[in-house]
Image (cartoon, rainbow, N blue to C red):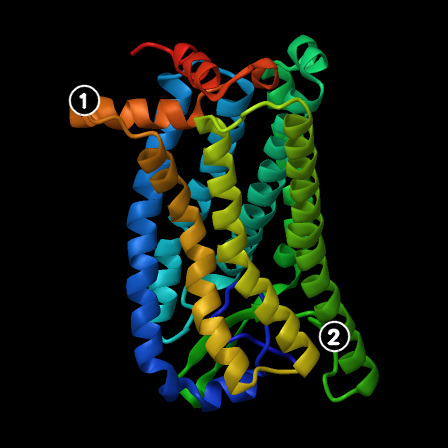
Amino acid sequence: METYQVKDGFHDHMSLQDFIAHLPEHTYTEILFAVLFGLGFLFGVMGNGLVIFIASFRMTKTMVSIWYLNLAVADFIFTSFLSIEVAYAALNFHWPFGRTLCKIHSAVSFLNLFASVFLLTVISVDRCISVAWPVWAKNHRSPRLAFWVAVAVWLAALALSAPYIIFRDIRSFPLQGDITLCYNNYIPMGNFTSEEVTTLWKHRHQAMVLTSFVTGFLVPFAIILTCYGVMAAKLMRNHLVHSGRPYKIMVAVVTAFFLCWFPYHLSTLLAMSAKGVTPAIQVLLDVALPLAYLNSCLNPVLYAFMGWGCKDTLWRSMVLAFQRALGEAEAQATLPSKSQNSNRSEAELPQL
């Protein structure tokens, strides 16, 4: 049986027939989603656009600023496509944009997921190396290396997003008000009354869900937690205090990503195990999807509030806040105290 998830642009959990039958029941929810997606589009595009501008033109190029620049680019691309999500939700999930945009829209959603979590993993590994092996880090870390690592991250994210370009499809239903749906069609030319084809569809669907969870959440967060465990052990063993702003920003961004994406991955796994969307899973999906979309709007807010300076003009304060948040802090593992750590970080900020 073909499936299509009611509200989730990432995966499919409800049959096309069930979705069509229950369209009137979702009217108020779709209006709420349209409003939330609209706000996400406005704040995400403006916030990430500002981060891109400042990191590109107002900051000295360092490894960390390059990491966060690429993270902002991924979020900017994704939030730009939320305008389509607004229209899609407002039209009660009627897709009038054609097959090509259906494929691109889904691929961009997963491109953002994979690129974001891979970049967070790279940043964590980079921080871990700087703390555990400061001499090696000082001799080998460079903006050029960061550039090529970022290229590798984007290529990996594109490769993992490619199946959604292949499988995403549209279908029209003239008897249900001429509605057109954008959904994952895992067997484009198959006879869906055949048990063999139905089994193949199920296996492909499970492979997509598990690949997304393992490569886009489980493995990256295992690496991130390992990195922070190594850093904590190193710092405690050397009796160092290591709580400068760059590390607070990194912990905040990783925590936000976990809180925003864990409910989504949990709901997809539960739906796959339950072989469909139960009322309880649907409630979880209703909460998980806005949370996942919120993550792309949240990072600029974290940068601003955790690096905010109140002594200057509004514009200068915003620029300085992002500079402080994204600023590099080299060789911090060798610093003996929190105060020295903080002073070193501030001294390295580029001047406006």
Q: Residue 311 carries which label?
A: 1
Question: What secondary structure is found at the residue carrying circle 1?
Answer: loop
Q: Is residue 12 left or right of residue 344?
A: right
* Residue 73 at x, y percent in the picture: 46, 36
| Number of the front mark, 1 or 2 | 1
Q: Is residue 265 above or below residue 311?
A: below
Is 142 or 327 nearer to us in this picture?
A: 327
Q: Can residue 91 be seen in this view?
A: no
Residue 337 located left or right of residue 145:
left
Residue picked out by circle 2: 201
Tag count: 2
Is 151 situated above or below 254? above
Say which quadrant the C terminus sits in: top left
Q: Which picture quadrant has residue 152?
A: top right
Q: Which residue lies furthest to the left in this view?
A: 313
Q: Where is residue 322 in the image (x, y as percent from the top left)?
A: 35, 27
Under tag 2, what secondary structure?
helix
